[in-house]
Image: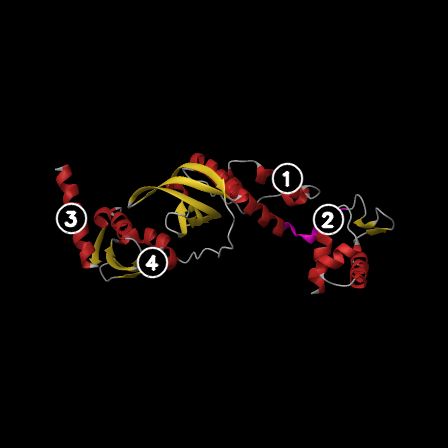
């Protein structure tokens, strides 16, 4: 489309001091005559484009010209800055702050006034997460293997992966890559990774986008039915939404949901102490009863 080509040409002119018509013609796969008409259209739109003949000639934007700030509205810029600030909250570097400063040059009105969107992705593990994120980014940029000790419910193991994506989901950071141990793509939680080391270079593959659907990451649902005390409503709403329970005549909340991990489910239910009764599945009800008995024995 013509508008896409015009925006593309303008972007190139903003990034390069000078470019020739044949270069633009090859890049956009159109004739030089079409490029000349596009340059005329940009001039009519108010962009002062200069063309020069000769050996060092070419097409450029007039020196000292600044793009009209209406290209990005104040609201759009604030949204961009909020997103960048969210990355700065976990990066542990000043890269994002420097980028924000560059974006605000010549547009102080973008930075003025109140910022009404604040995103903080940091956590209690910020001090340990920041260097891990930097190591993983370095490995991805340089296409080098990443080795680490990984802690899982099945124990700890040494892993060697080709890292491809750094992912923030479920309030946690993950790295997704090709695991040489499992001979398949896997996702690893950064908080469970220790002794991270960069290894030898690898030839990057054409990898698929990670499938982040819950049923793909956590296969096998557990149908849960439980009764909660009325004052647990806020937690159920926060963690599963307002439609996850039905209020009973006695005020208790009949909770129904799919859960993906048995151990996590038992731990979650125990966090409610005496305010919950697990009804189904029956085999987990027995396991929960055994856990409560062992806890009681320990404290008697």
Few, some or many residues within 10 Å of mark 1 (<14, 14–19, 20+): few
Question: Where does label 4 land, which residue?
Answer: 219
**Dot 1 or dot 2, earlier in sequence:** 2
Check if mark 4's residue and mark 2's residue have beta carbons within 8 Å.
no
Q: Is residue 182 left or right of residue 292?
A: right
Residue interval drawn in magenta? 66-74
C-alpha distance separating marks 1 and 2: 18 Å
SS at circle 3: helix
C-alpha distance separating marks 3 and 2: 68 Å
Check if mark 3's residue and mark 2's residue have beta carbons within 8 Å.
no
**Dot 3 or dot 2, earlier in sequence:** 2
- Give how far across and how far down residue 82 sits, in percent: 56, 46
Count of numbered labels shown in the rendering:
4
User: Which numbered marker is on residue 292?
Assistant: none
**Dot 1 or dot 3, earlier in sequence:** 1
Residue ID at (71%, 62%): 3
C-alpha distance separating marks 1 and 4: 44 Å
Does residue 112 appear anywhere in the picture?
A: no
Does residue 23 appear anywhere in the picture?
A: yes
Question: Where does label 2 land, which residue?
Answer: 14
């Amino acid at each position: 489309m013509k508008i896409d080509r015009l925006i593309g040409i303008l972007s190139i002119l903003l990034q390069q001091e000078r470019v020739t018509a044949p270069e633009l013609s090859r890049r956009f796969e159109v004739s030089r005559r079409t490029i000349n008409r596009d340059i005329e259209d940009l001039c009519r739109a108010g962009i002062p484009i200069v063309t020069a003949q000769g050996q060092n000639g070419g097409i450029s934007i007039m020196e000292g010209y600044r793009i009209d700030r209406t290209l990005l509205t104040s609201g759009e810029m604030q949204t961009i800055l909020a997103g960048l600030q969210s990355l700065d909250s976990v990066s542990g570097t000043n890269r994002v702050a420097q980028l924000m400063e560059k974006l605000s040059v010549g547009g102080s009105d973008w930075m003025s006034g109140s910022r009404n969107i604040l995103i903080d992705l940091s956590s209690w593990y910020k001090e340990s997460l920041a260097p891990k994120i930097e190591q993983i980014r370095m490995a991805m940029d340089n296409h080098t293997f990443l080795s680490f000790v990984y802690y899982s419910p099945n124990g700890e193991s040494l892993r060697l992966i080709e890292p491809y994506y750094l992912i923030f989901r479920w309030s946690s950071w993950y790295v997704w890559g090709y695991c040489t141990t499992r001979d398949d793509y896997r996702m690893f939680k950064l908080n469970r990774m220790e002794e991270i080391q960069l290894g030898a270079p690898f030839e990057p593959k054409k990898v698929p986008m990670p499938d982040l659907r819950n049923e793909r990451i956590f296969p096998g649902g557990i149908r849960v039915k439980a009764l909660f005390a009325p004052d647990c409503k806020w937690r159920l709403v926060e963690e599963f939404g307002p439609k996850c329970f039905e209020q009973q005549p006695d005020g208790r909340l009949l909770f129904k949901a799919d859960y993906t991990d048995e151990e996590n489910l038992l731990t979650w239910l125990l966090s409610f102490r005496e305010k919950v009764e697990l009804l189904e599945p029956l085999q987990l009800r027995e396991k929960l009863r055994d856990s409560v008995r062992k806890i009681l024995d320990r404290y008697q």
